[in-house]
Image (tube, rainbow, N blue to C red):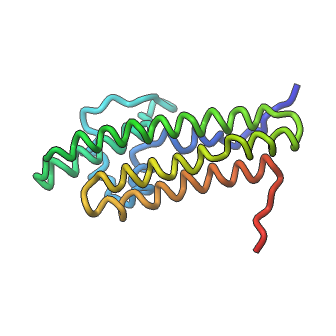
């Protein structure tokens, strides 16, 4: 039986369940802003008795908080919700893909799977972009670092599992 390396978190654990402080770092926002945005929001999980939140939960809370504080509640709010649901679905597809990729026994099987299904990572990037575009004008500066980390982590795991290198 193959054992996973201990000490290294899976992409889904590291990216999708985050603390308030980690959310503040990723979104380049003040911790107080994140704390206020998540006030009244039930955590998705707990880790060592500390609340942890899914990406979609944090993004919805920040979007709602931003919308309320800027007093720009408009018909765009429903558009944001639609885009966030699409983003969460794309994230689920990437997690499932990476799980299947990890389950492949040989490198050729992983490479074949990556070629046939790897485009889900691109779909996740497009869902991020649509979600960012649907939000307030300053959302690009706020969410781009998070998008880059999530997509970069998925690509790094794909490259590692397939033993592929990027030629420079």
Q: Position of residue 29 (x, y in %)?
A: 34, 58
Tell me if residue 48 comes above or below residue 16 in the rendering: above
Q: Quadrant of residue 139?
A: bottom left
- Seen at 30% across and 39% down, the residue is 81
Q: Residue furthest front?
A: 116
Q: Residue furthest left?
A: 71
Compare residues 59 and 50 and report the one nearer the observer: 59
Q: How many marks?
A: 0
Compare residues 28 and 127 and report the one nearer the observer: 127
Q: Quadrant of residue 102?
A: top right
- Seen at 33% across and 28% down, the residue is 42
Q: Position of residue 23 (x, y in %)?
A: 41, 49
Left or right of 159? Residue 43 is left
Q: Position of residue 33 (x, y in %)?
A: 27, 52
**The C terminus sits in image quarter:** bottom right
Q: Quadrant of residue 152?
A: bottom right
Compare residues 112 and 80 and report the one nearer the observer: 112
**The N terminus sits in image quarter:** top right
Q: Residue furthest bottom?
A: 168
- Seen at 68% across and 41% down, the residue is 117
Left or right of 163? Residue 66 is left
Compare residues 84 and 25 and report the one nearer the observer: 84
Left or right of 22? Residue 108 is right
């Amino acid at each position: 039986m193959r054992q996973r390396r201990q000490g290294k978190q899976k992409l889904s654990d590291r990216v999708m369940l985050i603390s308030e402080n980690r959310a503040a770092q990723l979104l380049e926002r003040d911790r107080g802003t994140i704390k206020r945005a998540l006030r009244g929001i039930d955590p998705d999980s707990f880790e060592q008795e500390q609340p942890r939140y899914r990406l979609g939960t944090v993004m919805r809370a920040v979007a709602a908080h931003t919308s309320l504080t800027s007093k720009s509640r408009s018909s765009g709010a429903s558009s944001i919700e639609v885009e966030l649901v699409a983003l969460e679905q794309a994230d689920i597809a990437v997690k499932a893909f990476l799980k299947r990729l990890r389950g492949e026994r040989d490198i050729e099987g992983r490479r074949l799977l990556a070629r046939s299904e790897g485009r889900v990572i691109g779909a996740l990037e497009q869902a991020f972009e649509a979600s960012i575009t649907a939000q307030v004008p300053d959302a690009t500066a706020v969410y781009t670092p998070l998008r880059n980390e999530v997509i970069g982590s998925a690509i790094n795991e794909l490259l590692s599992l397939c033993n592929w290198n990027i030629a420079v």
